[in-house]
């Protein structure tokens, strides 16, 4: 399918330079990037980092807002 899209000039120039430097075409670079983005968005939001805990018991769920405040200020 042929289509027309508008790209920021700087992004288009950077993409063309990258395609040339890696021995591919701008079309192949765009198709690859679009496939990657579609697959990522299909998977939904994913967290790419861990919540570290130090001397704690991890994340606690099902707390009322008041309990969260009390625990964060060590009131309970």
Image: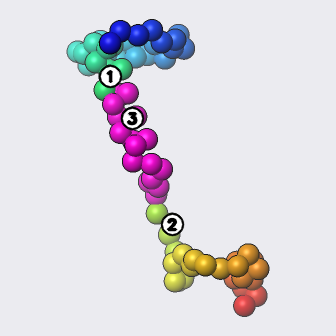
Helix or strand or loop: what does disc 2 sit on?
A: loop
Say whether residue 47 is left or right of residue 73: left
Residue at the disc numbered 1: 31
Residue 18's spot in the image, x, y percent?
Answer: 35, 18
Q: Is residue 30 above or below residue 43?
A: above
**In the rendered structure, which disc, 1 or 3, sits on the residue that comes first in sequence?**
1
User: What number is the disc on residue 51?
Assistant: 2
Magenta segment: does it hold 39?
Answer: yes
Image-quadrant location for residue 28: top left
| Residue that mark 3 sits on | 38
Q: Is residue 46 above or below residue 35?
A: below
> Where are the magenta residues, as a range?
33-49
Q: Is residue 48 visible?
A: yes
Q: Secondary structure at mark 1?
A: helix
Q: Is residue 7 magenta?
A: no
Q: Quadrant of the C terminus?
A: bottom right
**N-term-proximal mark, 2 vs 3:** 3
* Residue at the spot 35% in from the left edge and 9% down from the top edge: 2
Residue 24 image point, x, y percent: 25, 15
In the image, residue 48 lies at what x, y percent? 44, 54
Quadrant assignment for the N terminus: top left
Count residues near mark 1 (Cα–Cα under 10 Å), then give few for <14, some for 14-19, many for 20+. Answer: few
Along the line of sight, the residue nearer the viewer: 31 or 57: 31
């Amino acid at each position: 399918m042929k289509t027309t899209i508008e790209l920021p000039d700087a992004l288009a120039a950077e993409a063309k330079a990258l395609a040339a430097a890696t021995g591919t075409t701008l079309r192949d670079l765009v198709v690859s990037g679009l496939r990657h983005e579609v697959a990522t968005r299909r998977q939904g939001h994913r967290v790419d980092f861990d919540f570290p805990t130090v001397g704690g018991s991890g994340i606690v769920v099902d707390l009322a807002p008041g309990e969260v405040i009390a625990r964060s200020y060590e009131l309970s």
